[in-house]
């Protein structure tokens, strides 16, 4: 018997969606029987006469497919769906091709059987504001600043970077995002999704991690799986555009593999909306420059949330690599990191020096090179912070690195073009 996954029904209750699906026995290990895939949207700051229950089933099916299609491709199964949006359906071969180009060492197969294809484009005039994913990090802020005049609806997910279990911390983050949206005169939508829990990530990692070079989440689900959650909101808002912020840039010397990249994201469309992988023209340091100047120009308090640690309040630890990198990036542009949610002290400088002198930093070294370059270009800053003088003579080639054993095949993690 051919392996299959079948979407049996989609249930809505107010602004929640749950997906009932079945699959052949051989796929038992890849799904978590204890969890039904469920999404709950919070539309209290969203102007629409309708709610999620008014969205056609053919659109509601899209988040399910965004998370399950890659499983069916890589496990070579048939995926059966009762109804699907025509625009999304037509894009699937290109999206699949984008994954195949990103991971040429894997075979993306499988078949998709849709019983009824529904054209939603005529029903949806594209007059609404765009949707922009917003986590309050550097990339998300860049996209918001760039498209500020379009008054995007800010869409924030809980269930990945922000763990669902951290309810107190999530409330603090939601409160901050809500006030940011109000200040910028934008609507905002939060949603909780158990996208990482209804599948069995560890079984998928075990099967594919070696070839992907990293986890299922980072390499497969984090882009397509997340982006498709925007489909019901884009439908309700009659949006033409959905922005997803890039993590990397075409300018980067080393091109990093990532689940979210232009050769996948820019082919995703649903209803009348087109997804745009936004900000790919800018390096992370370009983005920091842009957003700091935006905050100054518009005189808005900007909290940049980058820390992976799950606090029960709104804060960055200011000591991990990502916090220090963002903090120093802001300082290098002549702004005070303490105005952007960080705690910079004299001791931070020594922490950075120690880290750069001893750690390999395979993903972020290029970003650090840019930060140090900006300090050298903006020399007045080092005069203001004499503890940073070491930067003027720091040489990346003379570092004494502590060797660490990579967990998986690093050759697959990065590739040069
Ligand atoms: Zn941190």
Image (cartoon, rainbow, N blue to C red):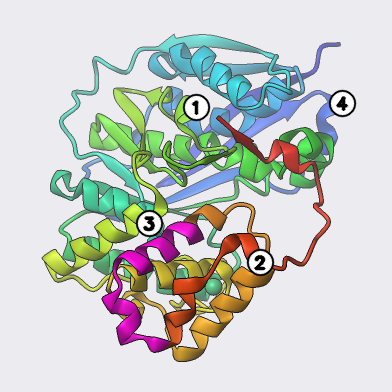
* View quadrant of ligand 1: bottom right
Foreground label between 4 and 1: 1
Question: Is most of the magenta stretch helix, strand or loop?
Answer: helix
Determine which residue is flagged by label 4: 26
Q: Nearer the viewer, residue 241 or 168?
A: 241
Above or below, comparing residue 333 to residue 24 in the picture: below
Mark-to-mark CA distance, 1 and 2:
37 Å
**Residue 306 horizontal/vertical position (percent):** 47, 65
Foreground label between 3 and 1: 3
Q: Earlier in the sequence, mark 1 or mark 2?
A: 1
Residue 190 in sight from this viewpoint: no
Foreground label between 2 and 3: 2
Mark-to-mark CA distance, 2 and 3:
22 Å
Residue 349 sits inside the magenta stretch: no
Q: Which residues are magenta?
A: 368-386
Residue 297 in the figure: left or right of residue 371: left
**Residue 238 horizontal/vertical position (percent):** 23, 31
Q: Secondary structure at mark 4?
A: helix
Above or below, comparing residue 191 to residue 116 in the picture: below
Determine which residue is flagged by label 1: 264
**Residue 191 horizontal/vertical position (percent):** 44, 52
């Amino acid at each position: 018997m051919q392996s299959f996954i079948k979407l049996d029904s989609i249930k809505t209750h107010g602004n929640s969606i749950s997906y009932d699906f079945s699959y052949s026995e051989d796929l038992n290990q890849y799904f978590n029987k204890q969890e039904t895939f469920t999404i709950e949207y919070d539309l209290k700051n969203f102007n629409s006469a309708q709610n999620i229950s008014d969205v056609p089933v053919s659109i509601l099916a899209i988040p399910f497919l965004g998370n399950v299609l890659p499983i069916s491709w890589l496990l070579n199964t048939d995926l059966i769906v009762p109804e699907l949006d025509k625009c999304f359906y037509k894009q699937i071969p290109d999206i699949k091709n984008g994954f195949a180009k990103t991971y040429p060492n894997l075979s993306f197969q499988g078949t998709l059987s849709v019983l009824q294809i529904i054209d939603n484009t005529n029903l949806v005039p594209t007059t609404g504001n765009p949707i922009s994913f917003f986590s309050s990090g550097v990339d998300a802020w860049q996209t918001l600043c760039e498209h500020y005049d379009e008054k995007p609806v800010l869409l924030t997910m809980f269930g990945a970077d922000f763990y669902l279990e951290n309810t107190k911390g999530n409330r603090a983050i939601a409160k901050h995002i809500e006030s940011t949206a109000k200040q910028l005169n934008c609507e905002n939508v939060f949603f909780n999704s158990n996208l990482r829990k209804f599948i069995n990530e560890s079984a998928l990692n075990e099967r594919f991690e070696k070839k992907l070079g990293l986890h299922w989440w980072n390499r497969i689900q984090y882009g397509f799986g997340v982006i498709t959650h925007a489909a019901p909101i884009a439908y309700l808002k009659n949006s033409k555009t959905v922005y997803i912020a890039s993590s990397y840039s075409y300018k980067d010397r080393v091109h990093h593999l990532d689940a979210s990249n232009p050769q996948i994201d820019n082919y995703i469309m649903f209803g009348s909306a087109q997804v745009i992988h936004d900000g790919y023209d800018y390096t992370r340091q370009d983005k920091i420059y842009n957003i700091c100047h935006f905050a100054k120009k518009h005189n808005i308090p900007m909290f940049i949330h980058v820390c992976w640690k799950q606090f029960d309040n709104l804060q960055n630890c200011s000591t991990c690599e990502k916090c220090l990198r963002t903090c120093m990036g802001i300082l290098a542009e002549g702004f005070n990191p303490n105005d952007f949610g960080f705690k910079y002290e004299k001791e931070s400088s020594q922490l950075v020096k120690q880290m750069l002198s001893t750690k390999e930093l395979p993903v972020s070294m290029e970003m650090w090179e840019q930060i140090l370059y900006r300090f050298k270009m903006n020399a007045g800053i080092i005069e203001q912070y004499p503890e940073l003088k070491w930067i003027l003579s720091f040489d990346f080639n003379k570092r004494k690195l502590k060797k660490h054993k990579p967990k998986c095949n690093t050759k697959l993690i990065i590739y040069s073009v």
